[in-house]
Amino acid sequence: MKNFLIKITGWEQKKEWKKLEVRAKAMPKDYQIVYEEIKNYMWNLWRFEAENDMGDFSTLEDLLGLFEEGVKNNKNVLDVTGKDVAAFCDELFHATESWKNKLNNDIMKKLGK
């Protein structure tokens, strides 16, 4: 019953989202700006993909980890992403898409489809 209520209310996702946002706000201003823009790009990109589970924030979590490492190493945010942030996003989301495709293909093979 508890799992059902968590799924219906989205409580677990909200909790996870809030943790990510706290981590993002702890970064320097330039990292926050780029993070927000990438996040907006991601939502716009995924808005039209019905198969995406928006409760999975693993891509943002990975991005924050990468950014936190950059901050720790005193790197400018554009040293982490490169000056072509759109290309960085394409690579980031392509990597995510590749894993998703691999999972689907593996399942189809095992099911004989």
Image: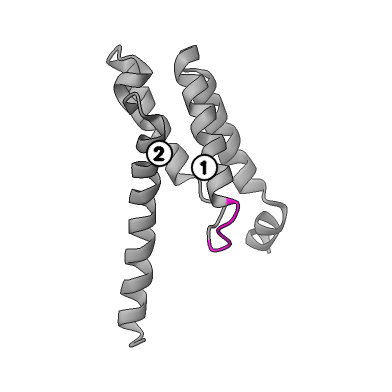
Residue type at tag 2: Cys
Q: CA distance from mark 1 to mark 2?
A: 8 Å
Q: Residue at x 34, y 30 (%)?
A: 66
Q: Say which quadrant the C terminus sits in.
A: bottom left
Residue closer to the observer: 87 or 93? 87
The picture places residue 20, in percent across and down from the top left corner, at 52, 33
The picture places residue 47, in percent across and down from the top left corner, at 60, 51
Q: Is residue 82 visible?
A: yes
Which disc, if any, is residue 42? 1
* Mark 1 residue crowding within 10 angstroms, few (<14) / some (14–19) / many (20+): some
Residue closer to the observer: 18 or 94? 94
Sequence order check, earlier mark of 1 and 2: 1
Q: Say which quadrant the N terminus sits in.
A: bottom right
Q: Is residue 102 magenta?
A: no
Q: Residue at x 35, y 20 (%)?
A: 78
The answer to the question of whether label 1 and label 2 lie on touching residues, with beta carbons closer than 8 A, is yes
Q: Is residue 30 left or right of residue 73?
A: right
Q: Is residue 39 left or right of residue 4?
A: left
In the rendered image, the residue lying farthest to the bottom is 112
* Mark 2 residue crowding within 10 angstroms, few (<14) / some (14–19) / many (20+): some
Q: Is residue 78 above or below residue 54?
A: above
Residue range highlighted in magenta: 47-51
Q: Residue at x 54, y 63 (%)?
A: 51
Q: Which residue is mark 2?
A: 89
Secondary structure character of the magenta stretch overall: loop
Q: Residue at x 42, y 31 (%)?
A: 64
SS label for mark 1: helix
Residue type at tag 1: Met
The picture places residue 91, in percent across and down from the top left corner, at 33, 43
The picture places residue 6, in percent across and down from the top left corner, at 66, 54
